[in-house]
């Protein structure tokens, strides 16, 4: 699949009082009515048990100027949220989110499916804010600025 170009997302949540966030490119739209998306969590990552328990989570589309976010949300042994402006869960967006994203949405887990060494997490989109104009893309293992609109 390295020849299939994707965007890059950062998925965040607060689970059992712990902040959790990872980089994700397995994000896919699933259904329009209701609006469902899915992403796959690797059973081997440290935060896997938290994602199994996560009710609500936020998905942020990473833009072309935000490669530092990728490094931050794949680095171990640091507080990945340190120094970032956060949006605390609200009635409209009931998940911990990052203020630096121009496009993000909040979703609630509606199903989890075992799939080999990953689990497919399906969520219903609850609210979104959309403003990204140039995404960061991932192709052949490289991060590349995407097109502008
Ligand atoms: C481009 C890219 C895409 C990724 N996509 C996913 C993904 O879809 N699912 C996943 O579980 N991990 C994915 N990862 C790996 C996690 O972001 C990474 O392992 C993270 O450090 C896990 O954090 P943790 O071990 O603290 O839980 C991706 C990493 C990169 C660089």
Image (spheres, rainbow, N blue to C red):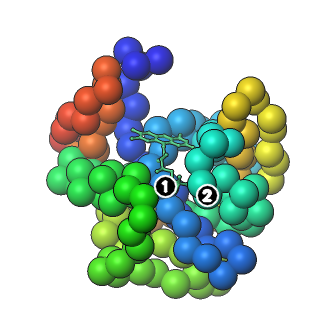
- What residue appears at the point 81 percent right and 48 percent down from the top-left corner? 111
**Local secondary structure at mark 2:** loop
* Quarter of the image that includes the C terminus: top left
- Residue 67's place in the image compared with 127, above or below, is above
**Local secondary structure at mark 1:** strand
- What residue appears at the point 80 percent right and 35 percent down from the top-left corner? 114
Q: In this orientation, does residue 50 appear?
A: yes
Badge 1 density bin: few <14, some 14–19, many ≥20, Cα 10 Å = many
Mark 1 and mark 2 in contact (Cβ < 8 Å)?
yes
Whichever of callouts 2 and 1 sits on the residue coming sooner in the sequence is 1
Badge nearest the viewer, 2 or 1: 2
User: What is the spatial separation of the Cα atoms under label 2 and label 1, in whole angstroms?
Assistant: 8 Å
Would residue 81 appear left or right of 128 to someone viewing this image? left
Would residue 130 appear left or right of 24 to someone viewing this image? left
Residue 47, disc: 2
- What residue appears at the point 72 percent right and 77 percent down from the top-left corner? 16
Across and down, in percent, residue 17 comes to: 66, 82
Across and down, in percent, residue 11 comes to: 51, 57
> Which of 71 and 88 lies nearest the eye of the viewer?
71
- Residue 57's place in the image compared with 149, above or below, is below
Residue under label 1: 22
- Residue 95's place in the image compared with 40, above or below, is below
Is label 1 within 8 A of ligand 1 (CB to nearest ligand atom)? yes
- What residue appears at the point 72 percent right and 46 percent down from the top-left corner? 122
Across and down, in percent, residue 126 comes to: 65, 64
Across and down, in percent, residue 89 comes to: 58, 81
> Residue 66 sits in which quadrant?
bottom left
Is label 2 within 8 A of ligand 1 (CB to nearest ligand atom)? yes
Badge 2 density bin: few <14, some 14–19, many ≥20, Cα 10 Å = some
């Amino acid at each position: 699949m390295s020849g299939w170009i994707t965007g890059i997302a950062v998925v965040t949540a607060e689970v059992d009082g712990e902040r959790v966030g990872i980089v994700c490119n397995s994000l896919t739209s699933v259904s329009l009515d209701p609006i469902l998306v899915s992403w796959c969590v690797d059973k081997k990552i440290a935060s896997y048990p938290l994602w199994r328990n996560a009710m609500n989570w936020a998905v942020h589309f990473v833009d072309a100027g935000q490669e530092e976010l990728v490094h931050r949300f794949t680095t171990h042994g640091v507080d990945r949220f340190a120094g970032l402006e956060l949006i605390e869960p609200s009635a409209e967006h009931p998940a911990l989110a990052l203020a630096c994203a121009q496009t993000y949405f909040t979703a609630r887990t509606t199903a989890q499916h075992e799939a080999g060494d990953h689990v497919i997490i399906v969520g219903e989109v609850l609210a979104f804010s959309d403003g990204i104009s140039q995404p960061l893309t991932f192709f052949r293992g490289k991060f590349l600025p995407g097109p502008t609109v």
